[in-house]
Amino acid sequence: MPKSRFGRAATAALAASGIASATVNHPGADAIVIETPHPDVIVRWAANATAVAIGPNHIVTTRHQGGGPGSPILLGDDIYRVAEDFQHPTADLRVCRIETYGSTPADLEHWVDIWEGGGEAGREFVIGGWGLERGGEQRNGLGELIGYGWGDGNKQLRWGTNVVEGFSLPEPGSPSDARIIQADFDRPGQGTVKEATVADGDSGGGWFINDNGVWKLAGLTSSVQYGQRSVFGEFMNGVRIASFADFIAPFLTAPPCSAADVAEPFGVLSRTDIETFAPLWYLKDPSIAALAAPSDIVSQADIQAFLDAYYAGCQ
């Protein structure tokens, strides 16, 4: 497909449109079994989007679907909530820390690494999401099949395949400065074995590349060319993960919690500790003397150490 179709102006308009985009396959492809990441790496963001687990307590998704702290995250019969929402200042991207409704760590069992290098163009990828199913056939005035409408319901995780066509940048001044990763939806028999595009409800869903047996997240579904239908030749856009590896990487591995001793005597370092510690510090309460090591004098440095440890993820 000609790269000229991925014009900068068109991409900017789509990025600004906020189209929440699930995988739509050709008839017959639903029964084709393909290799995919573990299905539990893809979670539902509330009732209108998708997200991908990148660690036991962190997910990554797009920003445009809205929501934030307190938003429900659904995985099978389990429901978590967003505890902290770290939004990229300009890209359609965010990383969220999630927890149980009892304020304990989510401790997800399955997650994926991110694609940090280049070379995605021309690579086949697997795409997954919780979006609308394929609807009825769409035909032009000559009766030729041109695509499919969108069906109802987004309560099933669907998978498909496609090939990375290239990349694009939005127009200067766009609300997103994301490097865009792109693919198109080929006619039956002209694309991949389980050729797929996206539909409403799939925003934040993953584009996964198999890197020598290891699934890595290369993109997040962000938008699609047309709304309410999937047309052959249409392009879909994803946030290119490699372009934001520096933003995402700090959340991938839990830092060593050698500073967690500042939580004593309040136990494991948590939001409760910070809520308890702060007023005691301001009152110079002697009960927090244990936090003053090594000088045994409670100082501003102690509370800073506490805050640093907390925000570093030692919780």
Image (cartoon, rainbow, N blue to C red):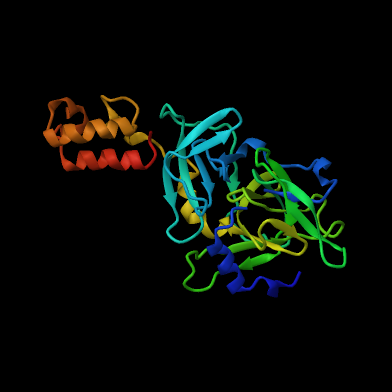
In the image, residue 162 lies at what x, y percent? 74, 55
Q: Which residue is located at x 65 percent, y 46 percent?
A: 131
What is the count of numbered marks? 0
Instruction: Name the quarter where the C terminus is drawn.
Output: top left
Q: Is residue 86 left or right of residue 30?
A: left
Q: Which residue is located at x 83 percent, y 51 percent?
A: 193
Q: Nearer the viewer, residue 282 or 158?
A: 158
**Residue 169, can we see it?**
no
In the image, residue 120 lies at what x, y percent? 67, 59
Q: Is residue 277 left or right of residue 69?
A: left
Height in image: 303 above or below 226?
Answer: above
**Residue 141, can we see it?**
yes
Q: Which residue is located at x 65 percent, y 42 percent?
A: 154
Q: Is residue 52 left or right of residue 86?
A: right
Instruction: Name the quarter where the N terminus is drawn.
Output: bottom right
In the image, residue 59 lies at what x, y percent? 52, 43
In the image, residue 116 lies at what x, y percent? 57, 55
Height in image: 176 above or below 48?
Answer: below
Q: Nearer the viewer, residue 188 or 231?
A: 231
Height in image: 294 above or below 180?
Answer: above
Q: Nearer the viewer, residue 84 or 244?
A: 84
